[in-house]
Amino acid sequence: MKPSERIILALDVPGFDEAIDSVWKFRDHVEIFKVGSELFTSVGPRIIEEIHSIGKRVFLDLKFHDIPNTVSRSALVAARLGVFMFNVHTLGGFEMMKQAAQAISKFSLGKNVDRPRIIGVTILTSMDQAAMQDELGIGLRLGPQVKQLAGLAQRAGLDGVVASPEDAEVIRSRFGKGFLIVSPGIRPSWAAAGDQKRYLTPREALRRGADYIVIGRAITSQPDPIRALKRIEEEIAGV
């Protein structure tokens, strides 16, 4: 893939106009835009329709996590919207992920349309070992826990996972090249870390096995966002 195809730009803004302004601003450098919970809750499906009208793809980042029937029905809504990719939370369990994957496969075959990629969120990049153990009461170490959740996602029929770039190498070695890894928590060496506790540079994330990297504020908060994006593209071009 070209560098522009590996970068997913996060539209972490609350309004329709702001989001679409960003899509137009970066349209020559980015193919996939992330629509998260703030933006989708604010403006609804029309943001996806507008991004598609500009000729770009959407990663719908709503982290579906509910009973299996509810998640599979939500997954069908995402598929009808024509998104390129969406996610569910692996902590929802095997049956939840399996039913969502089966519903999407049946829908796509029946409608003869491209099947959206379904990826599972493992452990959020804002959480570290202490938070996972002390707050959530999860006894496994971070690495083994991520590996276990990734394996659960693969067995359930998902296409890959959302995982910290720190976990990408072990996931890639365990599950092979066909299993997608989408990594948030990306910070160039010249950008602030923000609220991320587990992060790497774009180049290091791809070197460790990530297929896609999700970047938002590290680009949009810069004085010259286009230049910042080009610097990242140059950084990952040789990986």
Image (cartoon, helix red, strand yellow):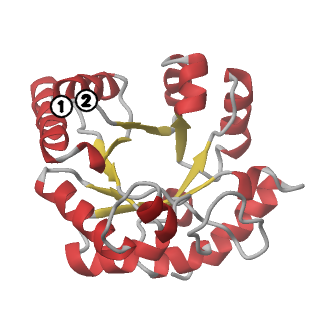
Mark 1, residue position: 68
Q: Classify 10 Å Cα crowding around label 1: few (below 14), some (14-19), many (20 and above).
A: some
Q: What residue type is labelled 1?
A: Pro
Q: x%, y% of residue 38? A: 59, 30
Q: How far apart are marks 1 and 2 (CA)?
A: 5 Å
Label 1 with label 2: CB-CB less than 8 Å: yes
Which image quadrant is residue 60 in? Answer: top left
Q: State the residue at coordinates (18%, 33%).
A: 104
Viewed as shown, does residue 239 lie left or right of 225?
Answer: left
Viewed as shown, does residue 112 lie left or right of 13?
Answer: left
Which quarter of the rendered picture does the N terminus lie within?
A: bottom left
Residue 82 in the image: above or below residue 239 = above
- 231 and 156: which is toward the camera: 156
Mark 2, residue position: 71
Secondary structure under tag 2 reads helix
Q: Classify 10 Å Cα crowding around label 2: few (below 14), some (14-19), many (20 and above).
A: many
Q: x%, y% of residue 152? A: 17, 58
Q: State the residue at coordinates (72%, 59%).
A: 194
Residue 111 in the image: above or below residue 135 = above
Q: What residue type is labelled 2?
A: Val
Residue 56 - label: none
Residue 5 seen anywhere in this rendered image of the structure: yes
Which image quadrant is residue 236 in? Answer: bottom right
Secondary structure under tag 1 reads helix
Residue 19 in the image: above or below residue 122 = above
Q: x%, y% of residue 159? A: 24, 54
